[in-house]
Image (cartoon, rainbow, N blue to C red):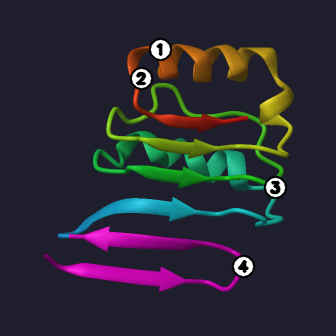
């Protein structure tokens, strides 16, 4: 297994296994471009962990990768959006083992 971990302080961190991003942690990143950047998440087919808590995130990409088993968007504007809440409830329904926090 080729494992690469990158940490950008409190801005972001990710893990890369065999050329595929498996963990993305952008918690507490103040960037207002967060929502736009996360549109690329749908292309990360092996992403298992996504933490966007405490950010200005306003929406999530649709669809989310089926590989996700951990999603955290607590303390974001997106967490208060009924449409995003429904999206995450639907994801949880079809991915019963996933940890979903909003």
Disc 1 residue crowd, few under 14, some 14–19, many 20+, Cα 10 Å = few
Report the Cα–Cα distance between label 2 and label 3.
Answer: 25 Å
The percent position of residue 23, horizontal first and vertical second, equals 43, 61
Report the Cα–Cα distance between label 1 and label 4.
Answer: 32 Å
Q: In the figure, residue 5 lies in which quadrant? A: bottom left
Quadrant showing the C terminus: top right
Residue picked out by circle 4? 10
Residue at position x 47%, y 83% in the image:
6
Is residue 54 in the magenta section? no
In the rendered image of this protein, does residue 65 appear above or below residue 56?
Answer: above
- Which one is closest to the eye, mark 1 or mark 3? 1
- Which one is closest to the eye, mark 4 or mark 2? 2
* Contact between labelled residues 3 and 1, with CB atoms less than 8 Å apart: no
Residue picked out by circle 1? 93
In the rendered image of this protein, does residue 84 appear above or below residue 64?
Answer: above
Q: In the figure, residue 7 lies in which quadrant? A: bottom right
Secondary structure at numbered mark 4: loop
Disc 3 residue crowd, few under 14, some 14–19, many 20+, Cα 10 Å = some
Residue picked out by circle 2? 96
Residue at position x 29%, y 50% in the image:
46
Question: Mark number for residue 54?
Answer: 3
Question: Mark 2 vs mark 3: which is more N-terminal?
Answer: 3
Disc 4 residue crowd, few under 14, some 14–19, many 20+, Cα 10 Å = few
Q: Nearer the viewer, residue 15 or 59?
A: 15
In-image side of 66 versus 93 (left or right): left
Disc 2 residue crowd, few under 14, some 14–19, many 20+, Cα 10 Å = few
Residue at position x 74%, y 52% in the image:
53
- Which one is closest to the eye, mark 1 or mark 4? 1
* Contact between labelled residues 3 and 2, with CB atoms less than 8 Å apart: no
Secondary structure at numbered mark 3: loop
Q: Which residues are magenta?
A: 1-17
């Amino acid at each position: 297994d080729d494992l690469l971990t990158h940490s950008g302080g409190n801005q972001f961190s990710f893990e890369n296994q065999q050329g595929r991003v498996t963990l993305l942690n952008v918690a507490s990143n103040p960037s207002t471009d967060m929502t736009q950047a996360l549109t690329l998440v749908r292309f990360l087919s092996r992403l298992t962990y996504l933490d966007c808590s405490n950010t200005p995130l306003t929406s999530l990409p649709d669809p989310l990768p089926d590989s996700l088993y951990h999603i955290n968007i607590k303390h974001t504007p997106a967490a208060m959006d009924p449409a995003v809440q429904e999206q995450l409830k639907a994801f949880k329904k079809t991915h019963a083992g996933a940890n979903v926090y909003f």
